[in-house]
Image (tube, coloured by chain):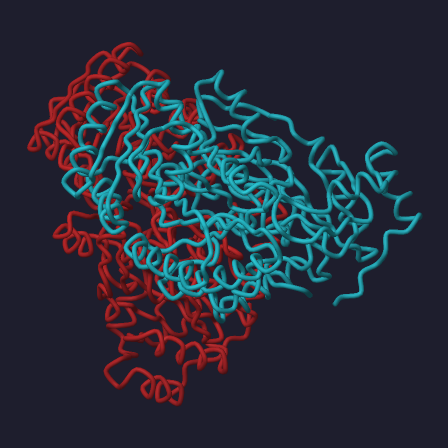
Chain colours: A cyan, B red
Amino acid sequence: MQAYGPVTAATLGRLAEIVGADGLSASEADRSLHARDQGFYAAHPPEVVVWPTSAEQVSAVMQLASRERIPVTPWGAGTSIEANPIPLHGGILLSFERMAAIVAVHADDFQVTVQPGIGHRDLNAELARHGLFFAPDPGANASIGGMLANNAAGIRTVRYGAARDNVLRMQVVLADGRIIQVGSRSVKQSSGYDLLHLFVGSEGTLGIITEATLRLYPILEHISAVVATFTAVEAAVEAVVAVRGGGLDPSALEFVDAASIELLNRNAQLGLPVGPTLFLEFQSATAQAAAESIRLAEEICRELGATSVSATANAGERRRLWHARNAAYEMMLRAYPGQRMFINDVAVPISSYPRLMRFIRAELEREGAAAFLLGHAGDGNIHVIFPCADDAAYQTCQRINAAIVEQALALGGTATGEHGVGVGKARFMRREHGPALDVMLALKQTLDPLGILNPGKIFGQP
Amino acid sequence: MQAYGPVTAATLGRLAEIVGADGLSASEADRSLHARDQGFYAAHPPEVVVWPTSAEQVSAVMQLASRERIPVTPWGAGTSIEANPIPLHGGILLSFERMAAIVAVHADDFQVTVQPGIGHRDLNAELARHGLFFAPDPGANASIGGMLANNAAGIRTVRYGAARDNVLRMQVVLADGRIIQVGSRSVKQSSGYDLLHLFVGSEGTLGIITEATLRLYPILEHISAVVATFTAVEAAVEAVVAVRGGGLDPSALEFVDAASIELLNRNAQLGLPVGPTLFLEFQSATAQAAAESIRLAEEICRELGATSVSATANAGERRRLWHARNAAYEMMLRAYPGQRMFINDVAVPISSYPRLMRFIRAELEREGAAAFLLGHAGDGNIHVIFPCADDAAYQTCQRINAAIVEQALALGGTATGEHGVGVGKARFMRREHGPALDVMLALKQTLDPLGILNPGKIFGQP
């Protein structure tokens, strides 16, 4: 444990000089509101919540925090689930609620420059007026800053990539208060070290993102969907490989297990056949291209043994389907009233997906645990969602979670595909990275020698 | 200047213990063969050329080099043009000629694991048997290791990205000999710091790539091409934006200036109208999709004032066109016998492309210099290619080059889109990166405290 400095009355005074009296709060209510994210982890309130309105204010806060060795934890929307923004060591919580502006839309460049606090849904609502959108979508209305800090992804990664693939340039405030620019608005850059991607996914432990220029894509008008039911996961995965191998480039390629299909049928009257199922989405520039994608995808799924394939280019039907898919988590909560859901998040090379699935089913059976399996199959990413009625159930799902992570790593995969390390995955980092973890620690030491940036995350307790 | 240790007879003996007697050479001939790349920069021979055959040997060489503080410069195929692999301080040159194997093809995962010495053309010849290809193509048969170290790109970046977008995992040997794995074969990973992309583009100054798992794409059978001639660069760029905005996703989107078109007509009998021209390529899963892409692209180009648009889905015609485009550099060499070509490489946000072009033309006019303009327009990347008859011409093109770089930076672009920093672009790094350059230097100091990895590159002379 490092000896952090406390937030004293004097500290509060100096903070007020930086952000103004209404730019901070040490009230019980505000501290509680920033004590936990949407995951399972225990609450830790900060000593003070600070709402900066500029990078210069963030810089001044970091200079103060460096001088007094006060921990600083950045906070976007609090929608993460691995405790990523929980201020474990108290100190200053930097909320980006008041830095949520669109700085500039560069429509011809397919780019937008934003402040970190803006929600990706709010951003996309504005971008729609330009016929453009920011593709990563983790479900909740996460902030852009949080998504970049976590390298969030979601259902459209198979075509558009994760957060790290959709950012070109960032402004970052370092632990000592220096303000730097990383990356470039040029989409191509071979100029020096790739600092941009070093800060993306670093979960606020190396620097604080205060502005970002994002890569956008045109909204394509012709969207079609295919739902294919299989008798075995293996056949579904074969179809995933064949669809991608055929160059179809789906914009979503989701796996939904039989239990989740039953849930969707019950709650959204989808009337789908029950079995391992793929949801595919295609975004096309023309109606012809959309029809062609549907035709080919149907053909592939049937050839690979799908027992049922249905397709639609009808916007209403497609929306109903995706709305149901997106509401699956809420349906699960309703199906297990009063229980909390623990969400596992691992990813493997797609060829290992069937083996991982078999392992997961065997583990669930052995432990007698109920769970839903929802996966971004196109990326080899799977989420096992456990209802937890009590502590015993939580302990069980923790055992299964650890076993699944170990299995994913053994299969050449990762402990976290898109939720980040936070607190819960820190214990798997040595296993996943080996001696590369020492390099990460060395970089942390170089950029944050006092250990004040979001301490306790990624590497575990300092 | 750092005090590097010399390669003594004792050093050669210890190296022979590591790689065997036939694994190294201090002969004049071998040293000369590794003294310069394909660019303009002066030759600097290494003291010894070493051909390792495994990461363990590279590790042992690095341990030795660390103990004796000997500079080590990795060498792929020597096809770079910014002096990136020239051993400026002598020492050990590590050639990866004997580490050029395909380790494993993971066809279902759209991945291949290779040693760094393999040429991308040789790799693609083998991958074609699996219906897959590695997309980045810098023109020459560059080695994969060199392409990753340089973040090389080429004509298909507009759809498939640069080298950094097409690598998932690497094995890297650090300056002190530690062997680490960075990235993951999982296409999604939010697990700790992105060390993968820190090493990509670091030009051998942070570590040595000894193995890489690359992202592959399916070879699409239906390839079509569109050539559109405009009266002004502005209209051509408008078409670039409109084509991308329409969701057409071309696999190449190249700008060729009037002078280059004349050259292509003269040498390849293309009979194209002379003017600012776009070459577009579409790779499609079906013939219908190909036809549709052509139709839409033609429509867009005509609407935006193209004076001539021709399209073809005929493989022979298309190949003739791209062969001519790819041979443009050789044609330039033939058009200026005995002269060397200096190639400029900057990139800007696409909306600034017309302004950059106007600036370049004005500079050329002011200096009375001849040059060809070839650009990866889809990426905002432009190459100005200067024939240099003598030292005076070289000085002129250096002046123009510097002015173009400054202008690209002023327009929010980069000093190098795809050739890397090497020696020639080092002087622009402070201007491009500002205080972020100090972060790069701090990382260099952390990972290579003795400064033995490819000294003199990116940051200039130590």
The image shows residue A179, relative to residue A284, as above or below, that is: below
Residue in view at x 15 percent, y 56 percent: B126
Q: Quadrant of the N terminus of chain B?
A: bottom right
**Which of the two residues, A90 or B178, is positioned nearer the viewer here?**
A90
Percent position of residue A431, x then y:
48, 69
Residue that lies at the very extreme toward the right in this rendered image: A9
Q: Is residue B366 left or right of residue B440?
A: left
The image shows residue B339, relative to residue B382, as above or below, that is: below
The image shows residue A40, relative to residue B455, as above or below, that is: above
**Which of the two residues, A52 or A240, is positioned nearer the viewer here?**
A240
Residue B363 in view in this figure: no
**Which of the two residues, B101 or A334, is positioned nearer the viewer here?**
A334
Residue in view at x 12 percent, y 31 percent: B318
Residue B341: quadrant of the picture: top left
Residue in view at x 46 percent, y 67 percent: B453
Percent position of residue B244, x then y:
34, 25
Percent position of residue B137, x then y:
26, 46
Residue A315 in view in this figure: yes
